[in-house]
Structure formats: C-alpha cells, structure tokens
Amino acid sequence: MSQYAVPGELKYTEEHEWIKVEGGLAVVGVTDFAQQQMGDVTYVDLPEPGLSVEHMAELCVIESVKVAADVFSPLAGVVAEVNAALAEHPELINQDCYGAGWLVKLKDYDVSGLGELMDANAYGKFIERG
Amino acid sequence: MDFSPHTDDDRAQMLGAMGLSSVDELFAGIPPELRVRQWDLPRPMSELEVTKRLGRLAERNAHGLTCFLGAGFYDHFIPAAVDALIRRSELYTVYTPYQPEISQGTLQAIYEYQSAICRLTGLYASNASLYDGGTALFEAAMLAVRRTGRKRLVICRAVNPIYRVMLASYTANLHLELVEEDLAGGGCAADLLDDKTAALIMQNPDFFGRVHNYADAFAKAHEMGALAILCCNPLALGVLRTPAEMDADIAVGEGQPLGLPLSFGGPYLGFMAVSEALLRLMPGRVVGRTLDGQGREGYCLTLQTREQHIRREKATSNICTNQALCAVAALIYLSLLGKEGLRELAQLNMAQAAYARQRLTAIPGVRLMDPGPWFNEFRLELPLDARVAVSRLIDKGIAAGFPLGRYYPEQANALLVAVTEKRSKEEIGNLAEALEAVL
Amino acid sequence: MKTIYDKSRPSRRGVTFPAPLLPDACFQEACLSPELLRASPAQLPEMAEIDVVRHFTNLSRQNFGVDVGPYPLGSCTMKYNPKFTEEIARLPGFAGLHPLLPQLRRGGLLAQGALEVLHEMEQLLCAITGMAAYTMQPLAGAHGELTGLMLMAAYHRHRGNQKSLVLVPDSAHGTNPASAAIAGYTVRTVPSKDGVMDLEAYRAMLGPEVAGVMMTNPNTLGLFEPDIKQISEAAHAVDALMYYDGANLNAILGIAKPADLGFDIVHLNLHKTFATPHGGGGPGSGPVGVVAKLDEYLPISRVARREDGTLFLDYDRPHSIGYVAPFYGNFGVVLKAYAYILALGGPGLKRVAMDAVLAANYLRARLAPQWRVAVDRMCMHEVVLSAADQAAQHGVTAMDVAKALIDFGFHPPTVYFPLVVKEAIMIEPTETESKENLDAIVEAMAFIAKKAQDDPDWLHAAPRSTPVGRLDEVRAARQPDLAQR
C-alpha cells in the first residue's frame, strides 16, 4: 500500500489539493502527498475572506524552508473562512493535513465542478504513477 | 603575472589521468567556427608595473580638494579600525553564506547590522543590504506597488534628484505613474494622494539639507490606503525623529555616511527597514537567529522563499549579491561610535554647518535660501551662476559645493554646501574668504 | 558567540571627535523643535575600540574564506583574490574621490584618472567578449540582468515591437526569470534535453511575441550549448535579442566570445571571472556589454573622449534608458578587476580558462567511479554530480555530502542547483586550486562515498568541526528572529 494517506471520502486534484463538502461549504486543503513533498511548513499566506476565485486560480501559498507552493482552488467560489490557526501553527499542515490543517472554506462554489475531480481511488493511482 | 599554481608537469599529469594529451581536447565541445579568432589584449604585467600604472592614474584625480561637496554622498572621517577589520580576508574572501556552519562570522555580523538598522529607524525588520540608496528606493516603491496593487507613486521633488531619475528609468517599462511635486515646503497636498496611490515618498533631511517631520503627510497617505516611504540619512538618525516615529512603513537610504569611502560612487550601501506587516514582501537576503541540534544559538539565511533562487519570476526582487561587506563596515563604524557617539557626531555635523552658515551668509550678496532647520547641508543663493563660482574656487583648492542648476534649472545661482565633522574652522574660513573674493 | 549588543556597557566609547565650532550657540537639538527629534538615542553598542576589534576578529575566525582553503562553490567562481588589487582600490586618489567631482568643472577634468580606468576597462571587456560597448553602472550580476532587460525593452519600444515574453532555460539561475519579471516581461521556461537546451522545444516556443532569450553558456551543468548558433539565429529571425548571463565566462576566456556566439547583450560578474572578492554577499559588479545596435540605449552617463584627448561624461543620449545606478557603478570593484586584467594580460586570461576547465575535468574523471555525473561527458569549468543514488539507497543526501566536506577542510560545493538535477552537487574548482588540493577533494569524496554505504549516520551528523552544527532552519522561518530588540 502507498506511503501516502488518501481518505476515501474526499475529492482530489492533480495539483494535490483535496476538497470536501461540509455544511454547505467546500473545505479545501492539501494532501498528505503534498505535505510530505514540501517538508516542514513554515508559513501560509491565506486569502482574505470574501475573495472570489476562479476554478484552479491561485488560492494561497504554502511555504517550507526551501519551497513556496501555490495552492489552486479546486472549484470556483468565494472564500468564506480561512484557517486562522495556521498563522501561529503552520505545522498543522504536516501533522493533520486532512483535519486541523485545512486551509480555506468556500461558499457559493460551483457544484458542477465537483464531478470533474478525482475520487480517492483515482488520486491514489495518480500519485503512484508519479 | 597570473595566479595559477599549475606547473606544466601538473597539467600533463591531470591530462594523463583522463587519457588526453592536450588541453585543447577539452574544448572539443565548442564548434571550431565559434572559436576566438582575435584576442587583442595587452601583454601580461607584473604586480609592480600594474601598481605603478594605477598609482599614476590615481594622481590624475583632484582628490586633495577641501570638500564641501555632499548632495547625498559625504566626506566623513572613517576610524582606522573599520578598514583594519574588513581587510581580514576571512570576511572579504567569502561568498554569500549559504553554508551557515562555516559562515557564522558573516551571518552574525549581518544579524547585528540588521539589528542596528532597526534600532536606527525604529522599524521592525531590516534586510542584509541592497546596492545603494537609489535602488533601495526603487525596491521600496515596488514593494508598495505589490502590497497595494496600485500603480501610482507620489514623490517629493526634494528627494535626491539622482534617485528620482533612477526611479523613472526603472519604472519606464512597468506602466507606473510617477507624480513629482514640491511637497517638502508645507504639508502634503491631500488632493495628490488618491485611492490609486501606492506610496508617498519623502526624504529627511531633504536634498536641500532641511529637516522635517512628515507625520501628518504620512497619516494622509495611510488614510488613502497608500504606504509611506521615507528616504533618510542614517547619520542624521543619530538625532532626528525616526521613520517609525513618523509612522513610515518603509525606511530606505544610502549607508555611505556610515564609514564608507566616497570611492567615486561605490561600493556603497542601500539599507531598508520595514514594518512588521511588510516583512514577507521585503526584498533581499535576511539573516535570522535560531538553534542547532544541540541547542546552541546560530545564524542562517531565512525567509528565503521570497527570493529569486526559490521563487524565480515570482520573487520579491531579483537581487542576489548585495553589499554585505559594506554593511559589515557600517556595523563596525556604528559600534565604534556607539549610542552617544552617533548622537554626538550628528550634533557636531549640525554645529559645523551652522558655523559655516554664519560665516558664508555674512558675505555681501550671499543669501540663505531656506529658513531651516537644517542637518549638515544648506543652500545659498549667490549673485552669479553657482557653476562659475564653484569652478573659480577649484583653483583655490576647494570643492565649494554642488551647483543646483543641474537638477533644478530655476536654481542656477543656488549652491548646496555640505559641512561634515572633517571641516575645520580654518577650512571654513578659507571657503568664506575665497568665496567672497570670487563673487 | 555573544552579540555585540550583549557586550555593550554604558558610556564606553570607541572613537571621539573634535569639539564643535559653535559650542554654545543654538545649533543642536536646542534649536530643533521636539517634533523633529527622536525620542531616545538609538541603542547602539557602547564599546572600547579593543572590544570592537576583538569582536569582529573573532567573528571572522568563524568564517571559511578562499584564503582559508579550497572553495569549489559551483557557479560562484571562488578563485583566489589577489592582494595588490586591494591596495589599488584604497589609493587616496581613488578612494577619496567624490562622485560629483566631474560635474564641477567642464565635465570630468577633475577626475581624468578615474575616467581613464572606466574607459580602458570598457575597451578591455569589449576585447574579451566581442561586444561593441559596455556600461560599468550595474552593481552586481542580477543588476546587470535587469539593466540588460531594460535595454532590450528600450530596443523593442524604439522599433515599435510589441513583445511580452522572455525565454529562459530550465537550468537557468533564478535571477534570470526574476530579472525578466521585474523588467515587465512574462517568463516562459524552455526544457533541457541531455543537459542542454532542447532545440525543438525552443523552436516551438519562439514567436513574434518573444523579446529575448536569456542563456548561460557554458550552462549551469557546466556544458557548452552546442546549438548556440542555431539558437541565436532563430531568435534573431523573430527580432528577439540574445542575452548572455556571464556567470560562467571563466570557462571560455580567450576560447570563445559571446558576440561570436550571437549574443546581443552580456552581463559579466567581475566578482567571479575577474577575481574581485565577494565580501560574503557583495559588493559585486555587473558590467553590461551590447552590440552596436544597442549602444544608443546604454545608461547615462557614458565616458567619451574629446578631440583634445581628455575624457568627459556624456549625458546627451536621447535614447538612453537613463540611470540604473547613481554614478559609474561599484567603482572600487571595477578598479580591482581592471588591475587583475592588466596583470594577466591576453595570455594569462586564456590560461585561466584552460586551467579552470582542466581542473574541472580532472575532478570529473577522478570522481566518476564513485559518483554519478549528471551528464557524463566532457565538461567545461564545473562538473555537476548527483547524489540521487546515495539518497535512494542509503538516505545520504547532497546536503550530507556538503556538510561532511566541511570536516575535511573544504568549503562545500553548491548543492541542489541546478534544479534540473536531483540531489545536485555542483563543483567548480577554478584555475587557482593546485593539483594537490584537487586530489585531496577526490580523496575526501571517495571517503564520503564509502561512508554513505557503511555508515550513513556518520554523514548525517556532519559537520563536527564547526562552532555550530546544522541549524534549525524551520525554526528560523517559523519564528523569525531577525534583530536583537
């Protein structure tokens, strides 16, 4: 089995973001694969709530010591909430990327875009192919 | 004279290890038609010959003049210890400190330099240096453009004119609007600042040596959502209100007054300090203090994701090599002066300039152009073209100042006179007598 | 080591000044209203001169410089810095010269010696690179790049060209794309193939919207770009300009000239090729040379000769991009490079390239049995190894190799660059390292290769001989401590 966790209930992008719908909002984060590739996350540059983003537009930037990675929005939508805890504790992305290390919640998102995303099975194969 | 240690025997052995017989074979990858056809360079010279030749060239420069020339670049005294220390080759024959374990000397010195700049300006963070005051001002303006997403820069005409033309050159291809106005006389005209303005840029002391408090102008800039940028003379910060006390967001300036020789325009030192909110947009190298595996304190380059080697076209600047050794020289200079020394030197500069003002304005026909207050420089109106007066005084061994007509055509008779701690009573008296004689 | 602020003691002083000429008059803070003054003095260290001298002397002892030992830091050309050039830059006739002095009397008469240096240096660099004219203004390599791109923009603007793209190979220095972006261009990355630019991919990317192509040759893998002539011809066919990043000029001094390779704009790094010291991160100097058709756009001022033989500063250049530096560049650095070029002369400069390339290839040949060479063929002035095998098999990274070399008395090579090589170790011995030193590097690298198999943890624990061990860079970035408050 893979060395990367890929929870079954989430949807994924080829840029290694995950998304799940929860209480009318779409929660976005980065995958275990992405956080392992990055190494220790040192800083997250989060967007302002209210920002409208296009599908696969730059949503935020995650930095480690030697890498700055753009995170793209898996769906078009409006930023409803950001994970303020990351300002003090960027390491949450390494410790719990699918939970406490979430990045952004989107509202008014494009529901039709969900169908375009990979399920866990497809994403698992995608990262194994490299 | 070359500096290669290789003997012909060494070369033959190295070639032999590769199974080659001639160095030419190593260049086989360069197509013959691309090889050098003409190599018209001088014959080699010995160290003695080069030194003599350069010595002769050095003597063809008028370096013995008594210097009242400033205009942003000053003839200050440099304690011998500054040069003695930066001539330690462990400090000057090193590259950028990419490997911190064997670069703690440079890294700690840069950290201490950053600390000194923060203490001088009152702002939160300093980088490891930029090229010079003018490029630092450009970087500050670009920081403001990035931060605000706006494209209009309002700059006072009393900012060093060389920096203003540099800014115009750099922004020519960037679709930015530069608005130059005379803002230093009174408060900043509010109608100049609008919701498209990225930054208000002021200088203190201004190019004419006048001292200001820009707190009100900066407050207006902030009301319009613009950043406040202050270009300042670091020596004057020994006494003057700090950029932080005026609520500037970014302080930049030329560090040459801090122990660097005039050296015909460089190497100098651009410094930059920013407020905490702008830290991650700051250009250039930054050194941070951290711990090693055993808990020992040490220093390393940090926040590197802002920089070109990681962020490439998205970097906050393209700067790589900066002016590190000049920054270390400035730190040594500031350490020798210390808290009281810097204040005393700033006061001394003001005092010498005040004395010169007294002497020079006593000359019939010479008029002081501003009501003050000043730092170590002031402008006089002469009864003739200042260029003519200056040229005449050169023959008496004096560089009397900078004729302002070059940058301000309406001020053809204006002379900008700088007086540092190096100018003695006798030298100032000589200037006054000589000036009176040539008018 | 304690910081200089920790060592400060109230009322100690390292320097004193003469008494003011107006001791009693209203001259100082008294005549400035309080709103113009700082609330409290800047908290600078208070030290006796001896304490300052010891502090910086002891700091310097924690540095490893070229004068301490071999410094094969790839791409940085850390050759020996001759001492006599330091003396020359400090001659009072140069060091004491105010940059505005030429403006005080009939353009330049007061600084003929300094202008002569600038003028001759320009001609020497033209002879070395084949370009038609140079400006000494750019203050470092990246600043030269920005200047060159501004020249490119001025050229296209003047010709009415609408161009927005700059092509940069994937092996380029990070400054190339960063400079292009700051000059207002959009960057497109050209892929490499077998270590050099992929000609087919490049041709597919070329179009009328391409303003220029930035290349380093030899490139950052230490390989000469064999298709350079086709690359530059194709660029010129769409009126794009060829930009030469001079970081690796050391390899081709007297062997090939950038102008003959089809380049239109060149920047040089005097602190690399021409042996001026790097100062731990500057000052550098990055003169920019151009072909004749770009001459009119060069920054002002230009040094020019009058009919009477005297030199002057020419500001009357209507198409100039303006000022990129306040005056004439890092003049003190230009002086040192000038003295170096005069000392070596034509034959010496060519010897530099030959010895530098010989040394790099000797290392390549000797290291190849233990280390994978990124592109295993004849290299130029530097060789790029990959520790990817050691990383995969033993968990020993390029960083481990670098740190272990410190304990053998060497400055580490450049690691993790170029980005196109996994676990890259980029070694540039330069021409000034003797065969004994090259052999010592080989021995150390062989030892490290063996240790990687037998005892990887020994390498993970390196370096052992330094005042601090590997630093916690994550902590430094997460909780930035950038100044002592």
Image (cartoon, coloured by chain):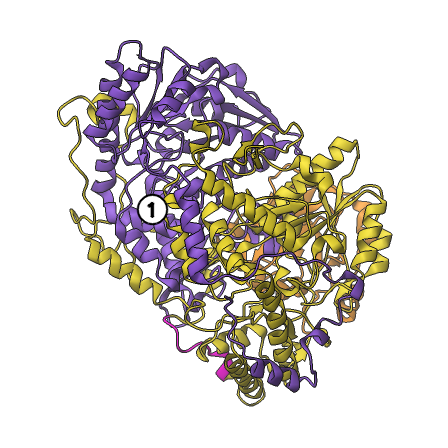
Chain colours: A orange, B purple, C yellow
Look at the image and tell me whether residue B214 can be seen.
no
> What is the x, y in percent for residue B118?
36, 43
> Going by the image, does C321 lie left or right of B157?
right
Q: Which residue is mark 1?
A: B116
| Crowding near the residue tagged with mark 1, few <14, some 14–19, many ≥20 C-alpha atoms within 10 Å | many
Task: Indicate yes or no whether the magenta region holds residue C331.
Answer: no
Q: Please state the extent of the stretch shown in magenta in the rendering.
A: C458-467
Residue A98 placement: quadrant: bottom right
Disc 1, SS = helix
- The type of residue carrying mark 1 is Ala
Depicted C215 relative to depicted C348: above or below? above
Of residues C228 and C416, the one nearer the viewer is: C228
Kindly identify the residue that appears in the image at 61 percent across and 57 percent down. B41
Quadrant placement of the N terminus of chain C: bottom left
- What secondary structure characterizes most of the magenta part? loop
Q: Is residue C365 above or below residue C238?
A: below
Q: Residue at x 67, y 34 (%)?
A: B173
Q: Quadrant of residue C189?
A: bottom right
Taking depth in this image into account, of C315 and B239 the one nearest to the observer is: C315
Q: Residue furthest left?
A: C24
* Residue located at (76% from left, 44% from top): C165
Residue C9 in the image: state x and y as whole percent: 18, 52
What residue sits 30% from the left and 19% below the top? B435
